[in-house]
Image (spheres, rainbow, N blue to C red):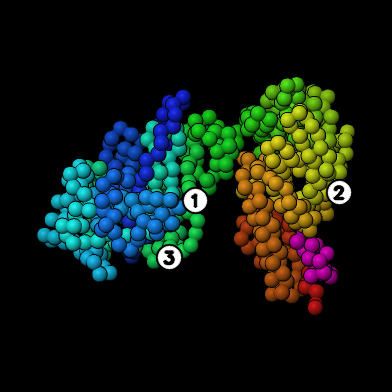
Amino acid sequence: MSESTVHTASATATPPPPRPAATLVVVRDAAVGIEVLLLRRAERGDHNSGAWVFPGGIVDASDADAHRCCAGVDDAQACARLGLERGGLGYYVAAVRECFEEAGLLYARAPGQASLVELHGDEAARVAAWREPMHRGERTLAQLCAAAGWELALDRLVYFSHWLTPPVRVKRFDTRFFVAEAPPVQISAHDATEVVEQRWLRPADALSRAGELKLMTPTLKTLEAIARFDRVDALLSFARAPRTVPLTMPMIGRGRQGQRPVTPDEPAYAELARVDPQCRGSHSYEIEPGRAVRLSPRLVRVTANNGSVMTGPGTNTYLVGGGSDNLWAVIDPGPDDTAHVRAVLAGAPGPIRWVFVTHTHLDHSPATAALVAATGATVHGRRAAHPEWQDADFAPDVELAGGERFALTPDCTLRAMHTPGHASNHLCYLLEQERLLFTGDHLMQLSTVVINPPDGDMAAYLASLRELLAEDLEWLAPGHGFLMARPREAIEAVIAHRLRREAKVVDALRALGAAGADALLARVYDDVPPRLHAMAMRSLKAHLLKLEHDGTAVERARQWMLVAR
């Protein structure tokens, strides 16, 4: 089974400090591709019991004695690679020691030799006899090296990843993961004490059996990372290349799979880190339509039950305000849905006095009329320049140009920003005190937005995105999805994506000469499923119109071509 149940400490207890630990991912080339060594932990009554893991454990005080036996990496080099001021070599030594104790594989060699020691026959038995006494603390790795005249081949270990146990766990570890090719003339053998079974498996095979094997989150994610490589040398080349190894601490969330760890590659991760940094598991890793979600003292989100290919998990309506008067504003009332309007009214912590609309597409503004009827709120927004796909009934009390500031409370200020592109009347709103931008459909999580001419304009969209780069932003609150951290990265990624797509349009025009939109679509959006081509066609037309505006392309008789230069 995969990890699901989270064994936690007391909700009121101080989180235990993490213990330094090391893990060694042993890999080898096989006819079927890369295989990894997995060991099954013995039943010990903790959350690791019965889990399939890589060899590893805590950094032991005795590991310092082995420093004098180390070769290939010294403490200064180890610290530089691990980003530590001191003690880095201990992680390397611990990884080698734990691998030997648990799996019988020893990364050691005779001084002056390049190859690792060969362990077979009587020699293998003599060396194996050290494993149990070392596990009991009666002997040390340093003593083994001294007795055999060996040195530890630490240059065979390549730093791979860094994992920190969430603060809610009863046992916490600050673990450095290393990867190394299996010693060629040694045979792995589990110790039958700490681990009770071993298997060499392709990462993909282990992942496909996640319902059968108990794989902890770091193990699962490491297998996913290694599965991208076909050969050990390719994996090690990647790991050795200059790169930043981020610290990964899973958050804890709840949802249909129960309470479970959530990793940075999941949409909810940044939001969970913001609202539940102690990992109590009080927040959901799923968007739950109709549920009022408190994101800060000033901010509540209610999501409409209108999820689709176009709207993702549903349209987000935000409630912003509070203060001593407990007055609130609504950003994007949402679709014309009575149940959603009821949920927004029920989720408002106090009276709703203002409505702010990002744009008037049919999933964002039609509920305005029902909210105004129920609350008497003043409506702010812009009318669209073109009627297609728009809420024809939208009529703001206050027409915004961009730049207006609204002090909802003494400590809650919204600034309107005109951001045309997805729609001519698109606005974003900046919550100044939190440096949080309500993006409507200007930026979405896990997807790019459709630019649909004539109201949508690709040139205007890119210009609006670039203007946002000048803002000091900390969070994005999209119209669809969870809160997003690192706004600059998100904005730059969208700009880069749009420019890559534009480059594909130019390449297709260069290759085809004069071509209709259908022929261009097949080339430019060859990475998009055909079921989404109708939507992609809208953005293709937006790219073509931008190229025409730039003087790069021209349309004649429904055929597009590059302008001769």
Query: Of the numbered discs in the image, which one, if any, rests on residue 386?
Result: 2
Q: Nearer the N terminus, badge 1 or badge 3? A: 3
For this view, does 457 lie left or right of residue 67?
Answer: right
- SS label for mark 3: helix
* Residue range highlighted in magenta: 542-559
Quarter of the picture holding the C terminus: bottom right
CA gap, disc 1 and disc 3: 18 Å
Inspect the image, locate mark 3, and give the three-letter code of the amino acid beneath it. Ser
Inspect the image, locate mark 2, and give the three-letter code of the amino acid beneath it. His
Q: How many marks?
A: 3
Can you identify the residue that label 1 sits on?
Answer: 246
Can you identify the residue that label 3 sits on?
Answer: 237
- SS label for mark 1: loop
Inspect the image, locate mark 1, and give the three-letter code of the amino acid beneath it. Pro
For residue 107, above or below residue 63: below
Whether residue 538 can be seen here: no
Q: Nearer the N terminus, badge 1 or badge 2? A: 1
Quarter of the picture holding the N terminus: top left
For this view, does 341 lie left or right of residue 554?
Answer: left
Q: Horizontal and vertical percent for residue 29?
A: 34, 64
